[in-house]
Image: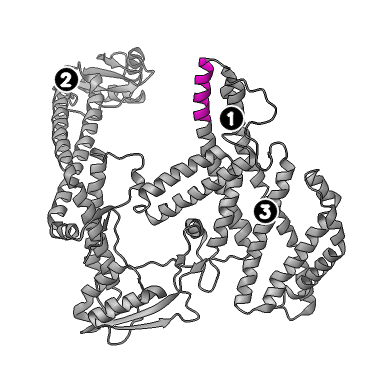
Amino acid sequence: MAIVPMQQVSICALKKDRKAILEKLQSMGVMEIVPMEQTEGLAVMDTLASRQQFERNAALLEQALSVLAEHVPEPKSLLASFEGKEKISGRDKMATILRRDRTMERAGKLVRLARSQSENRQRIGKLTAQIESLRPWENLGLPLNFKGTEKAAVFLGTLPAGVTAEQASALIREKAGEDVPFELETVTQTPEALYIGVLCLKEHAAAVESALRAEGFARPSSPTHRLPARKIERLQKEIESLKQTNEELEADIRGMAEDRESFKRAADYFRTRAEKYRILGELSQSETAFFVTGYVPKKAVPAVEKAIGEGYGAAVEVSDLAADDPGPTLLHNNAFAESVEGVLESYGLPTKGHVDPSAIMSVFYVFFFGMMFSDGGYGLIMMAACGFVWWKYGKTLKDSMRKMVKLFFWCGVSTAFWGFMYGGFFGDAIDVVGRTFFGYTGEGSILKPLWFEPMREPMRLLVWCMFFGLIHLFFGLGIKGYEYLKDKDYVGFVSDVLSWFLFLLGLIFMLLPSSLFSSIAGDAFDFSWAAALAVPAKVLTIVGLLLILVMQERAQKNWVLRILLGAYDIYGVTGWLSDILSYSRLLALGLATGVIAQVINMMGSMGGKTVFGAIMFVIVFIVGHALNFAINVLGAYVHTNRLQFVEFFGKFYEGGGKPFEAFKTVNQYTEVEEEAS
């Protein structure tokens, strides 16, 4: 439950050590470097061209890797995404640097091969389309660009679908005249068009062409001086040649699969170089010295002082952050609480001086997730799957993935706990199997709930859900009060926190013995004891009400306006009521998981106590519960997040923190192992 304290570190060192110092800072990965204000006598090095070249190199290598992924996919297991980065030694890294020119040459060649292959495929597509356009003319004994002889005109082309040769001939006679001699031949007829040839004397060509165009006549789009059949034959030969070329290119591409690891290592190298040159272009420097300033976690400052100050004789100045400088945010929590840091980051990080809610949030998150998913079988599956990944790949997982796996492991523990508390194990699978296949006829469930069965007592669970929700909300309000006390704002604590605690607690104790609440709780609870607290409850309510009325809008100097605005703030109690009712989703999703699971079991058992029935049950059980698991684990995740983001955070959390972005190596594929000195 802590935000790592930051300090500002400024370094002044000799320019001759610039490369070594930057590489050392980058390998340490503990400093977020920020640009310095421009000072007279200091300059900034223009590194844009070099950085862009490194980025282009990395992009080319990524393009080469994409080509290999398309043509020669890596054989990967189902758990490959958890395997993390490849571990390489410092010697491997040096070999990558020495071979970088050859690696870039190979990558460029691979991309060119793929580009040539793509261009050939496009050419094949165009040639194929051209062949298709010539197919209807294949049996024509004339070139498509043939216009006629010295005395005769020839029109080759198409008429729209639906127009017959007889209709075209009749139109020519009508438009050109009955005495105009012509000959119209059908070459081919398809559902799309009528392919024709028309022969007439040249002196009548204009009239015949005009008549044809009136019916939508169009000449071939790709006229050729060769016979259509010959042209098709030449195009087919060209296509075969291109296909043969592409097969050779494919073999060459596949033969370069051995370069995949070199491409990955080189891509990481160039990305790291690009990041280094980005920082280098932001540093102020003189003819003999350069300056670096940035944020470093307080606990890492001694290491920076030793590595840079003592190692290179540089001047290292350390100072606390100014009051108006929030600095970047870096969280540090115990192994359990850090599992929800990814969820918190998706909402927004806290800023300096505010509370990191991860520790409290982690308890409620896991608690509520389990209540919503609430099935012992599903919980054990989550525990086993996440536990295996955690055990097998825990050291190689990316930080965000590692936190997510841990979160779902603990959510699995909570799910299993609530499942057994409610008596749910794949719904009522144990009872269904016992009754259907083993003849169990006893009364009640075989697997007894450790607490109670929500299906039989939903109102009892609803009351408990609202009770847990109230605790959750009060914790949020309590954190707000803690921040007031930490800042020594006692007036704010009384007016914004204590007043609401008194007001709400008074209302609750007044409501408990009422008939309204009794109708909700039913016979599951007896709150008659709360009647003895009627007078203290009224006192708490009145005191809280007066504090809100008088102090909530304390910034207002006009007392009339202050009272009026305070009265409006009291209306905020409806928001509290809405928030508390939101926790009914704990009941709704928990029941949904159990009801769907029971329906699946009932459907699976419809085959009875037969071989077919047993097979049917197994199939329906596996498929049905897999779907139920997928649907409801997503629902539990979404609605648990909502309870944190809307109800809990709404009481105290502001967010707005900027994540700590250390200057470090940018490795996507590899990780250099530290070698023993």
Amino acid type for the residue under numbered disc 3? Phe
Q: Nearer the viewer, mark 3 or mark 1?
A: 1
Total labels drawn:
3
Q: Are marks 2 and 1 in contact (CB under 8 Å)?
A: no
For the residue marked with disc 1, what is the amino acid? Ile
In space, the residues marked 3 and 1 are separated at their CA atoms by 30 Å
Residue closest to the eye, 543 or 513 = 513
Q: What amino acid is at disc 2?
A: Ala
Q: Marks 2 and 3, Cα distance to the nearest angstrom?
A: 83 Å
Q: Nearer the viewer, mark 2 or mark 3?
A: 3
Instruction: Using the image, tell me which numbered label, if any, was put on residue 468.
Output: 3
Question: Is-magenta flag for residue 622?
Answer: yes
Q: Which residue is mark 2?
A: 229
- According to the picture, the residue beneath numbered tag 1 turns out to be 430
Does 486 sit left or right of 115 as displayed? right
Is the C-beta separation of discs 2 and 3 under 8 Å? Answer: no
At x 82% / y 48%, what residue is drawn?
Answer: 518
Q: Is residue 506 magenta?
A: no
Spatial distance from mark 2 to mark 1, Cα to Cα?
Answer: 74 Å
Q: Vertically, is 241 above or below 587?
A: above
First reached walking from the N terminus: tag 2 or tag 3: 2
Q: Quadrant of residue 318?
A: bottom left
Q: Which of the image's four quarters has the C terminus?
A: bottom left
The mark lying in front, picked from 2 and 1, is 1
Range of magenta residues: 611-624
Of callouts 3 and 1, which one flags the residue occurring earlier in the amino acid sequence?
Answer: 1
